[in-house]
């Protein structure tokens, strides 16, 4: 009852604020503010779409958001989405080994199942355990990644911990050309890529194909990862476009060996996703988007050696969405609906197959008042498996002069139980059909400033109160366990980020995160949630032919000692790019990466050790 009352109070406050503001005069983002932001951010970073599902200035975003662009990904010489997210302050990546291996994101101490990952609007999280393997997502096709750190349920539904929204490249008159690249590294760790993009008459196109392979930088962690992606646009009229995407990936990896019991573990995953959307500008102020999407994932885990076993999971489904965006002099109102119909097939759940139907309505408004921006939002989700839930939110930003922005955000969020939690049925686990959503009430506050000359800094504080947290009970007779809603947790902390403007072509970046996570019922600190993480980077760009990035990261994982983890030191990577030929739109680059320069350990569990120092180099030809 107290939770529901808090939601009603937050919603009522939002409505009152909207009514108050609608009677006031508004003001767009100032030229001074744009000038301040452009000193530290590229053009692609100045606007985001993920927080309200409509394009808005980053200065009006109350949530804690980080944007990573294609240019930054290229400088990293990253292979997969996991490589990129492992450099973002506030995000930690649990990875089984080197590039292409199983990897899961954690945000602000929230579990991997509480982080929603999307590619062009398609959710990658599987139905069996609600996680997304970011280690199999190639980066070449990525134009921009928008990361919301904290609950984003008022826009996206089940996203208690945050959202990773991947937006892929699109061909246009301004984005044309072709690229082929190849890199070669230790243990035959090779990455081959090709892409083409452009526009012919009314048709825009982007096509990508790539293969990542490795014999394994650690024992029995080989990789064979093949991916392809296509994105096509067609200008039906001057005001209406049709968008089509199709992606395919097949990944086979070794998951280590158990020498004590003579066992070897291997996984295979196959994924197909697609979207079809119509975007139409109905008038100067009104835009309509209608989309459909499909997704199929099949996962097989095998154990060989002294024993033989195999687990198979297959989930598939389709969905649709409709969104209406209305803009006037001081409002951007977004009203939308989502629908998904999915099913999971596996021997580990009752009946061998279970379905999930979800539908939702959401609305939000971004209102600009001189230096003040206010964003109320609310979403209602209905599910066939775990009931219904309402998620309100309210965000405020305020600009002080041209160089400082204050942010505040409050929201209710949730995470759905997995279908395995709800319908599981095997010798070790019994499902709980009465399981409810895991819920959070979140408060965030922050400041972003460049008041100190040559230095940009962002400080963000958060406090997440989680109720109905998932916990397990064990049957004393059968020794099987069941998930129940019994936990209460508090996860709070502070993030600090900074960057300098280039001096002698060199810029410094740094970040830190401190987390305190407690079980409110026992008062004990929660294990397996990082207590602190530090990032440091040094970038060099002579604006002519040479670029370099030195990046270091330390994470105190606070893992259960039984996992025998090691994480007492930094891991540094050095990436260098040299342009050796340039003529008009044609260029040839050579790049070299030195990973884990100082040969340090940083892993949560001894069975998933990080690779020791390794090198790779390659060529990139653009024409």
Image: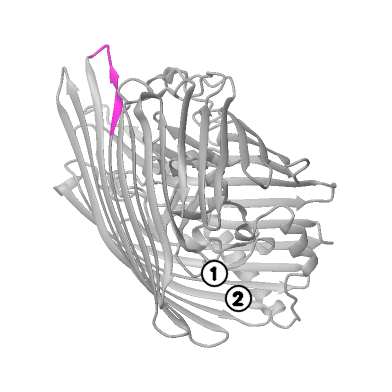
Numbered-mark total: 2
Using the image, determine if residue 1 lies above or below residue 198. above
State left or right for residue 107 relative to residue 231.
Answer: right
Residue 393 in view of the camera: yes
SS type, badge 2? strand
Residue bearing the label numbered 2: 332
Q: Earlier in the sequence, mark 1 or mark 2?
A: 1
Looking at the picture, how far across and down is residue 320, in whole percent? Answer: 34, 69
- Residue 108 seen in the figure: no
Q: Secondary structure at mark 1?
A: loop
Task: Indicate yes or no whether the magenta region holds residue 448.
Answer: no
Q: Residue 414: x percent and y percent?
A: 47, 53
Magenta span of residues: 253-261
Q: Position of residue 274 (x, y in %)?
A: 31, 62
Residues at marks 1 and 2 touching, judged by CB atoms closer than 8 Å: yes
Majority secondary structure of magenta residues: strand
Residue nearer the viewer, 332 or 457 = 457
Residue depicted at x 50% and y 80%: 287
Q: Which residue is mark 1?
A: 54
* In-image side of 554 versus 113 (left or right): right
């Amino acid at each position: 009852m107290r939770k529901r009352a808090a939601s009603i109070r937050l919603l009522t406050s939002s409505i009152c604020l909207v009514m108050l503001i609608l009677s006031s005069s508004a003001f767009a983002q100032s030229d001074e503010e744009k000038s301040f932001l452009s000193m530290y951010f590229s053009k692609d970073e100045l606007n985001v779409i993920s927080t309200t599902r409509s394009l808005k200035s980053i200065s009006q975003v109350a949530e804690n958001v980080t944007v990573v662009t294609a240019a930054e990904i290229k400088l990293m010489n990253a292979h997969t989405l996991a490589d990129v997210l492992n450099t973002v302050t506030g995000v930690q990546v649990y990875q089984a080994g080197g590039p292409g291996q199983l990897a899961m994101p954690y945000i602000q101490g929230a579990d991997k199942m509480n982080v929603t990952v999307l590619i062009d609007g398609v959710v990658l999280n599987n139905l069996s355990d609600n996680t997304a393997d970011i280690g199999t997502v190639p980066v070449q096709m990525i134009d921009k990644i928008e990361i919301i750190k904290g609950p984003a349920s008022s826009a996206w539904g089940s996203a208690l911990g945050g959202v990773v929204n991947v937006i892929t490249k699109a061909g246009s008159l301004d984005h044309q050309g072709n690229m082929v690249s190849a890199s070669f590294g230790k243990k035959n760790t090779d990455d081959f890529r090709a892409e083409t993009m452009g526009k012919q008459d009314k048709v825009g196109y982007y096509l990508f194909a790539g293969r990542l392979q490795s014999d394994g930088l650690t024992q029995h962690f080989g990789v064979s990862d093949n991916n392809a992606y296509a994105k096509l646009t067609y200008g039906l009229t001057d005001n209406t476009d049709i968008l089509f995407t199709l992606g395919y990936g097949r990944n086979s990896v070794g998951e280590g060996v158990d020498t004590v019991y003579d066992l070897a573990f291997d996984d295979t995953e196959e994924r197909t996703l697609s979207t079809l959307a119509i975007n139409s500008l109905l008038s100067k102020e009104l835009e309509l988007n209608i989309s459909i999407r499909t997704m199929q994932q099949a996962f097989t885990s095998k154990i060989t050696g002294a024993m033989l076993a195999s687990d198979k999971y297959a989930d598939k489904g389709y969905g649709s969405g409709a969104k209406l965006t209305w803009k006037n002099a001081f409002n951007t109102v977004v009203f939308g609906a989502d629908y998904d119909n999915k099913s999971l097939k596996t021997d580990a759940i009752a009946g061998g197959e279970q379905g999930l139907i979800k539908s939702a309505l959401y609305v939000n408004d971004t209102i600009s008042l001189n230096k003040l921006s206010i964003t109320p939002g609310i979403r209602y989700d209905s599910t066939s498996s775990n009931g219904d839930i309402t998620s309100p939110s309210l965000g405020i930003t305020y600009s002080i002069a041209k160089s400082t922005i204050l942010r505040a955000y409050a929201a209710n969020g949730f995470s759905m139980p997995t279908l395995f939690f709800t319908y599981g049925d095997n010798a070790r686990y019994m499902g709980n059909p009465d399981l409810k959503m895991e819920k959070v009430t979140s408060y965030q506050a922050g400041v972003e400033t460049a008041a100190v000359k040559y230095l940009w800094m962002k400080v963000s504080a958060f406090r997440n109160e989680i109720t109905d947290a998932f916990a397990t009970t064990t049957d004393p007779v059968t020794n099987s366990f069941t998930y129940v809603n019994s936990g209460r947790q508090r996860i709070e902390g502070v993030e600090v980020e900074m960057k300098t403007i280039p001096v002698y072509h060199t810029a410094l970046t740094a970040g830190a995160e401190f987390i305190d996570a407690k079980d409110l019922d026992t008062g004990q600190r929660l294990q397996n949630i990082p207590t602190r993480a530090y990032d440091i980077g040094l970038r060099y760009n002579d604006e002519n032919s040479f670029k370099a990035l030195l990046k270091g990261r330390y994470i105190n994982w606070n893992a259960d000692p039984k996992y025998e983890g090691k994480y007492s030191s930094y891991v540094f990577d050095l990436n260098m790019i040299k342009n050796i030929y340039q003529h008009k739109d044609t260029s040839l680059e050579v790049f070299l990466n030195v990973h884990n320069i100082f040969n340090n350990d940083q892993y949560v569990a001894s069975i998933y050790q990080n690779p020791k120092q390794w090198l790779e180099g390659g060529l990139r030809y653009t024409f």
